[in-house]
């Protein structure tokens, strides 16, 4: 594979706080169809070349945890969360205690690799996967894990803000000591302020930069409370998004998955290397330079997740 030498941003350093590296797209599988060879090694190589120093692999179910841990244990730059995504909380129902113990066991057995509890929270945009009451019950249950293992939270809140904050506030004794980040934030400025008042960080990715209102909200979030992410292979920045015009770094892309090559990205698949695009948009809307701002976001992430790994 030829590196994108003309795109390198070696003065920058990034941590992607959320990448779904166990997704089948990185094995060349889309739905149930194999479109190209597995290329996760290439994707990661491209990421390191673009200035990524660490990537946190997002885990959304107990069944995903082993694959994420296996991957993280192969590279000292890879870490993982452990938790159950709100849309997958039905997995708790048949045997809640065994599922809970299973999550705890993964954390206990991998203390150097598991750096957060999550992805957990509420998602009312996709209730066809899991109803509200089940989401709420098992979101709250996972907050105890964060307290017991003294880990920060990797949080999901989609179209559910009032219920989300009610649960957080009711469990402040479990939440406050270790803090957390509300990832993929796309809410209002008032919602951002409530999150910040509670001591959380806010994670920004392509889904956070779709509309002009999104951009105006992100502009007002203090730099020392922001982290950046790609949520790859999801949340790519599309030409129709308000932030797209502010991107300076563009990668060679093919539109058809079948046309994949080691030196191109796929139009419909987001990669960790594209975190530079998230960074460029934030810097542009704030009227700041990328390099010093990226250092601030890097330090924020180190402070929450890697205090003992500097």
Image (cartoon, helix red, strand yellow):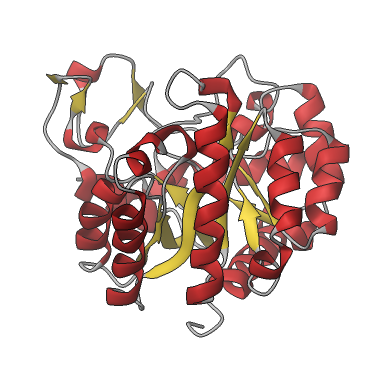
Q: Position of residue 181 (x, y in %)?
A: 63, 56
Residue occupying the point 29% across, 66% down: 106
The image quarter in which residue 216 lies? top right
Left or right position of 177 against 262: right
Name the foreground residue: 141 vs 63. Answer: 141
Left or right position of 133 against 48: right
Q: Position of residue 246 (x, y in %)?
A: 68, 31
Residue 270 seen by the camera = yes
Residue 140's place in the image compared with 108, above or below, is: above
Left or right position of 284 against 298: right
The image quarter in which residue 249 lies? top right
Residue 54's place in the image compared with 27, above or below, is: below
Residue 129's place in the image compared with 233, above or below, is: above
Total labels: the figure holds: 0
Q: Position of residue 107 (x, y in %)?
A: 35, 69
Name the foreground residue: 129 vs 52. Answer: 129
Quarter of the picture containing the N terminus is top left
Residue occupying the point 66% across, 65% down: 175
Left or right position of 97 against 249: left
Residue occupying the point 51% across, 22% down: 126
Name the foreground residue: 196 vs 275. Answer: 196
Residue occupying the point 81% across, 33% down: 188
Name the foreground residue: 7 vs 224. Answer: 224
Q: Position of residue 230 (x, y in %)?
A: 50, 42
Residue 177's place in the image compared with 250, above or below, is: below
Residue 249 seen by the camera = no
């Amino acid at each position: 594979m030829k590196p994108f030498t003309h795109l390198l941003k070696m003065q920058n350093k990034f941590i992607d706080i959320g990448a779904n590296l166990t997704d089948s797209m990185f094995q060349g599988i889309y739905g149930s169809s194999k479109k190209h060879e597995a290329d996760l090694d290439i994707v990661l190589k491209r990421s390191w070349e673009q200035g990524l120093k660490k990537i946190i692999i997002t885990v959304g179910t107990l069944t995903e945890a082993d694959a994420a841990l296996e991957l993280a244990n192969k590279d000292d730059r890879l870490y993982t969360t452990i938790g159950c995504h709100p849309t997958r909380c039905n997995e708790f129902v048949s045997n809640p205690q065994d599922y809970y113990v299973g999550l705890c066991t993964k954390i206990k057995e991998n203390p150097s690799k598991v750096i957060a509890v999550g992805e957990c929270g509420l998602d009312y945009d996709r209730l066809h996967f899991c109803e509200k009451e089940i989401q709420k019950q098992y979101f709250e249950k996972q907050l105890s894990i964060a307290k017991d293992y003294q880990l920060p939270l990797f949080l999901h809140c989609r179209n559910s803000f009032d219920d989300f904050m009610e649960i957080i506030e009711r469990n402040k004794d479990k939440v406050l000591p270790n803090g957390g980040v509300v990832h993929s934030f796309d809410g209002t400025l008032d919602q951002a302020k409530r999150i910040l008042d509670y001591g959380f960080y806010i994670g920004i990715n392509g889904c956070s930069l779709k509309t002009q209102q999104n951009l105006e909200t992100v502009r007002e979030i203090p730099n020392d409370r922001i982290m950046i992410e790609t949520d790859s292979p999801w949340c790519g920045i599309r030409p129709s998004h308000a932030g797209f015009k502010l991107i300076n770094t563009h990668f060679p892309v093919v539109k058809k998955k079948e046309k994949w090559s080691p030196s191109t990205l796929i139009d419909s698949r987001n990669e960790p290397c594209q975190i530079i695009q998230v960074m460029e948009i934030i810097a542009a809307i704030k009227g700041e330079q990328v390099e010093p701002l990226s250092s601030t976001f890097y330090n924020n992430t180190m402070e929450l997740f890697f205090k003992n790994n500097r």
